Image (cartoon, rainbow, N blue to C red):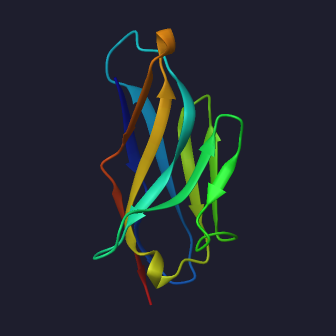
Amino acid sequence: QVQLVESGGGLVQAGGSSRLSCTASETASKTSFSINDIGWDRQAPGKQRELVASVTSDGTTVYADSVKGRFTIYVDTSKKTAYLQMDSLKTEDTAVYYCTGEMQLGHGHTWAGWGRGTQVTVSP
């Protein structure tokens, strides 16, 4: 019913910046929805998947301790797109970043899922 498509990422040097975006769209026509919450997880090789940042419909944000002060999440609700601005990147930020979200559908239903992921590689 809803799909999340990430863009951005790639190779960046340590200390640099990069921005990820995630657009939520309906997979079937006549599916209207709003964003309850949307965010990013990441998974580095050999490590467990972890929350990076999320934002709810009321604007409440949550950040992993490891990215506080360096990453900023924000949403353009008119475009149903979330952005993750990543500054002062470190080599340990290297991971596949997955957009995750919960959407409010009609008739009280919700949809939750994640995108296919985008690779972020931070070089020394």
Which quadrant of the structure image shows residue 47? bottom left
Q: Percent from the top left, x then y, of residue 27?
A: 32, 23
Left or right of 117: which side holds 74? right
Residue located at (61% from left, 28% from top)? 78
Q: Quadrant of residue 114?
A: top left
Residue at image point 38% right, 63% down: 49
Q: From the viewer's perspective, is residue 8 above or below residue 123?
A: above
Note whether 103 is above or below 17 in the view shown: above
Question: As displayed, is residue 16 above or below residue 79?
Answer: below
Residue furthest to the bottom in view is 124
Picture quarter with the C terminus: bottom left
Where, by quadrant of the figure, is residue 37 drawn? Answer: top right
Image position of 103 (left or right of 64): left
* Image spot of residue 57 (x, y percent): 65, 34
Screen quadrant of the N terminus = top left
Residue at position x 35%, y 58% from top?
A: 118
The x and y percentages for residue 25 are 42, 28
x, y percent for residue 8:
43, 57
Number of marks in picture: 0
Q: Is residue 23 above or below residue 110?
A: below
